[in-house]
Amino acid sequence: MNLLLLTPDDLTEAHRAVVRGRRLEHMRKIVRAKVGDRVKVGLLRGPERATTGTLANLCGQTGEAEITALDRERLELRFTLAHPPPKPLPVQLIVALPRPPTFHKVLQQATAMGVKRFVFVHAARVEGSYWTSRALKGDGPKNHMMLGLEQARDTVLPTIEYHRKLHVFFETRYRELVAGTDVLLGHPAGTGHMPTGIANMRTLVIGPEGGWIDREVERFIAEGAQLWSLGPRILRVETAVVAMLAKLA
């Protein structure tokens, strides 16, 4: 945890907060914090960003806090926020829904690298049971993205979309989503190596563990996607995501 990420619910008054749960345990047992210590903090900004009042000015900002009280039940802070979060990576991810442990890794690692939009879609080689997994429900996805934000000292929560029928996704959402972006489809059959650096917004498309079937690849190409490769080795989804984002960044 390189940043103690506060949520609006933690605030007790302007510039004061109380933290409990996982973050408290981390500060006590891992950081070994004590009263009087100063720590890096930020205030989470999500899709429901406040538009008026104090939160409108504070959400997304980073700064420092002094620990004013600490015990097994609570961590109290007095904080000052004065700096913006790091710039987002201008890449959005379309990923064939992976198995739950990989899903969590993708969320956490890509969030740490600056991705702000995840789009998970179905594919022929995606197990139908993945869509009913508890990993997709409740606060699970948000909690893993928050771990990524804490790692990277970021405060802006990404958005997630789920599309359980690939053909419906192409007909109703795909073109709007990728408009104005270069679409890069990671695939071993790609004739060129992944480009480096980002001149404009990119959409990175990653398939399932078994790969896209030919019909799916053909549809992406027909919609304007370019095939790119990291070489002949077949990588796990979470490895491919990080490797391709690193090349682009």
Image: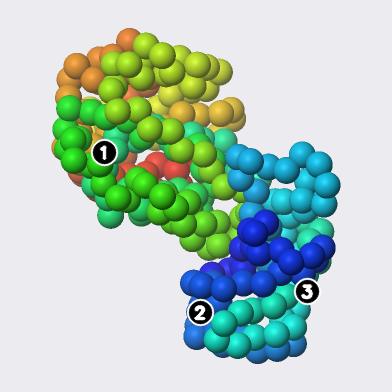
Q: Is residue 204 above or below residue 139?
A: above
Label number found at residue 131: 1
Label number found at residue 78: 3
Q: Is residue 65 above or below residue 89?
A: below
Label number found at residue 25: 2
Q: Reading the chain from its start, which is encountered first: label 3 or label 1? A: 3
CA–CA distance between discs 2 and 1? 32 Å
Kind of residue at badge 2: Glu
* Residue 181 image point, x, y percent: 52, 22
How would you rate the neighbour count of disc 1 (Cα within 10 Å): few for under 14, some for 14-19, many for 20 or more?
A: many
How would you rate the neighbour count of disc 3 (Cα within 10 Å): few for under 14, some for 14-19, many for 20 or more?
A: some
Q: Is the Cβ of the residue at disc 2 closer than 8 Å to that at disc 1?
A: no
Q: Nearer the viewer, residue 133 or 106?
A: 133
Res. 209 image quadrant: top left
CA–CA distance between discs 2 and 3? 19 Å
At horizontal 62% and vertical 68% (from top left) the residue drawn is: 4
Kind of residue at badge 3: Arg
